[in-house]
Image (tube, rainbow, N blue to C red):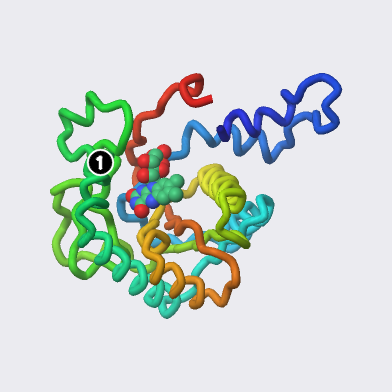
Amino acid sequence: AASAGMAGARAAGPGSAGARPATYAEVELHAAIGRRYSNRGPFWPDPVPADVRARLIAAAREESAWLDLLVGMTAIGAFAEIARSADKVLRRDTAYQAEQATWTHVDAACAGAARDGIPVTAGAPRAEPQDLLPQRFFTDRQRVSGRDYEPEPLVGILGVAGDRPADQILAGAGLQRVLLTATAAGLDTSMISQPIEVPAAREQLRRSLGRYGWPQIVVRFGYGSPGHPAPRRDVTEVI
Ligand SMILES: Cc1cc2nc3c(=O)[nH]c(=O)nc-3n(C[C@H](O)[C@H](O)[C@H](O)COP(=O)(O)O)c2cc1C
């Protein structure tokens, strides 16, 4: 959809009032589509520069969404507590866990045959008790015990004014533009939706931001080691 939308700036039919060539910024985002994927591994401690942060915030605004980047460990710690408690609620929900298991291919052999879902290579290593942010279960792959996942992740909360289907479309467009802007700037990203999926956690998150609008998704930004994309369907299959 991203590809069709952005290339579509030029492709609008004859007589269409909106027809215009794609802007330089749109060409850059379009080129990032093939390079974007979720990287759930730990990120390096290098901070994300202020101008890149400003571009991420502006990207959300361009789609009538907002992106609040958490600043400082107090804000990140408070968010992490909400996210971990939401994760605990979801871990007790057996129907949720069963559905998630059908989308995550822990067994590498079965992942190779699967067309959809997250292969084990695109998952995160196993969570450790001292981890700040919750991580879904993807694999038994251990990491060095006792070491922090990452000391101070850059966490952004993306939201929109409402929560009707039309608002959720805006949130999706905002997420698309933010993720592609991040990719174009050389950043890696992954998503955290536990605090959005548990209503009480979502309300707590909304209040902590001092917002009237609705948080829709949380994004972790940083510089990671190269990861492994999830499989893609052919564009003609979905459009
Ligand atoms: C609304 C939404 C919520 C998501 N929540 C999570 C999440 O909580 N944890 C996670 O690891 N990935 C999450 N994802 C990422 C998807 O799993 C991922 O985008 C999808 O598998 C495609 O892989 P890709 O991002 O590598 O292209 C979410 C994606 C969307 C659009």
Q: Quadrant of residue 32?
A: top right
Q: Residue at x 36, y 72 (%)?
A: 82
In this view, 112 is above or below 214:
above
Q: Nearer the viewer, residue 92 or 191?
A: 92
Q: Which corner quadrant holds the C terminus?
A: top right
Q: Residue furthest bottom?
A: 74
Q: Which corner quadrant holds the N terminus?
A: top right
Q: Position of residue 175 (x, y in %)?
A: 54, 49
Return the residue at label 1.
104
Q: Residue at x 85, y 31 (%)?
A: 17
Q: Position of residue 129 (x, y in %)?
A: 18, 68
Residue 29 seen anywhere in this rendered image of the structure: yes
Q: Nearer the viewer, residue 23 or 134?
A: 134
In this view, 95 is above or below 69:
above
In this view, 68 is above or below 221:
below
Residue 190 seen anywhere in this rendered image of the structure: no
Q: Residue at x 62, y 62 (%)?
A: 161
Q: Position of residue 14 (x, y in %)?
A: 82, 19
162 relative position to 71: left or right: right
Q: Residue at x 60, y 53 (%)?
A: 167
Q: Amino acid at mark 1?
A: Thr
